[in-house]
């Protein structure tokens, strides 16, 4: 009889209850010089980071590889209203169509981080782009050939955070996928297709939008007539599910490389 290979679902880490008063003291006395809120898409990390910023007197530095682009709002889920009065950085800093990269992010992060620290606020890095997070929490030197996923070394180069505190937003796979599907349908109703059509009409090359992946890839293919609306929606939902899984794989890899991530349910 044929043998069937069963898929194995990785066990989720156990959630913690964080002592935020202790975290506040650590930020005040220098035991923590950067809070990092990470997690897969649709895990509630932005809202959680905003609540931390409100409580701790913090400012948020975005670690999202696509929210840097102006005019790419619905598809990237900027949800700027969520920030309220909390200052944020590294959102809407690049023109759509350009290829912003991890080295540029590292340099922009260092400037924002130094400015926040100089004013006595608590810097909170929030996002799901693992390469961006590693590049600044490891003080990655781009003249080296060490992979960005490699173990974190002691940082001696000036300007980088030395004592980051990692918080992961935890959500089970079924809940996450349900949130992804609901959020995708909401964004389609809110005008995501029209947003991307507008970018194309304003001269952003289709190949650039496709290179950004996910929403911008599949909606552009739909607008070019290569996919029906139903095909676009189905393929896009599947791609986002897979992307969220890859994000969790990256973060668990960070743990295997020595990062201590405190997972919380939000």
Image: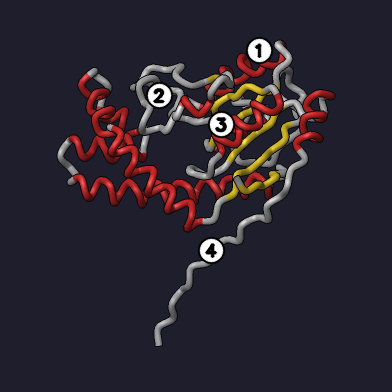
* CB-based contact (under 8 Å), mark 2 and mark 4: no
Query: Above or below — where is 148 with respect to 162?
Result: below
Residue found 48% across the figure and 68% down from its top: 7
Residue found 44% across the figure and 53% down from its top: 177
Kindly identify which residue carries mark 3.
132
Q: Earlier in the sequence, mark 2 or mark 1?
A: 2
Kindly identify which residue carries mark 4.
9
CA gap between label 2 and label 1 equals 25 Å
Are there few (<14), some (14-19), or many (20+) residues within 10 Å of tag 1? few
Q: Callout 4: helix, strand or loop?
A: loop
Q: Position of residue 197 (x, y in %)?
A: 22, 28
* CB-based contact (under 8 Å), mark 3 and mark 4: no
* CB-based contact (under 8 Å), mark 3 and mark 1: no
Q: Which mark is residue 99?
A: 2
Are there few (<14), some (14-19), or many (20+) residues within 10 Å of tag 4? few
Q: Residue furthest bottom?
A: 1
Which mark is nearer the camera, 3 or 1? Answer: 1
Residue found 60% across the figure and 24% down from its top: 60
* Left or right position of 231 against 62: left
Q: Which mark is residue 115?
A: 1
Q: Position of residue 21 (x, y in %)?
A: 79, 34
Q: Earlier in the sequence, mark 2 or mark 4?
A: 4
Q: Position of residue 105 (x, y in %)?
A: 54, 23
């Amino acid at each position: 009889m044929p043998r069937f290979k069963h898929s194995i679902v990785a066990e989720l880490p156990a959630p913690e209850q964080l002592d935020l008063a202790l975290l506040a003291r650590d930020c005040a006395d220098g035991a923590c010089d950067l809070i990092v809120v990470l997690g897969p898409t649709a895990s509630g990390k932005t809202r959680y980071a905003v609540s931390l910023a409100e409580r701790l007197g913090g400012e948020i530095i975005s670690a999202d590889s696509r929210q840097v682009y102006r005019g790419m709002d619905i598809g990237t889920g900027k949800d700027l209203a969520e920030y309220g009065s909390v200052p944020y950085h590294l959102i809407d800093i690049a023109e759509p169509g350009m290829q912003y990269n991890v080295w540029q992010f590292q340099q922009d992060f260092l400037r924002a981080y130094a400015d926040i620290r100089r004013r006595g606020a608590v810097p909170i890095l929030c996002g799901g782009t693992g390469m961006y997070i590693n590049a600044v929490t490891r003080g990655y030197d781009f003249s080296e050939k060490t992979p960005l996923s490699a173990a974190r070394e002691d940082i001696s180069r000036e300007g980088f955070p030395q004592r980051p505190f990692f918080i992961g937003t935890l959500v089970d796979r079924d809940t996450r996928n349900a949130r992804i599907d609901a959020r995708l349908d909401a964004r389609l109703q809110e005008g995501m297709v029209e947003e991307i059509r507008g970018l194309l009409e304003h001269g952003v090359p289709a190949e650039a939008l496709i290179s950004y992946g996910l929403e911008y890839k599949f909606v552009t293919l739909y607008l070019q007539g290569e996919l029906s609306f139903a095909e676009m929606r189905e393929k896009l939902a599947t791609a986002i599910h897979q992307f969220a899984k890859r994000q969790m794989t990256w973060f668990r890899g960070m743990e295997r490389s020595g990062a201590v991530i405190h997972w919380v349910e939000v």
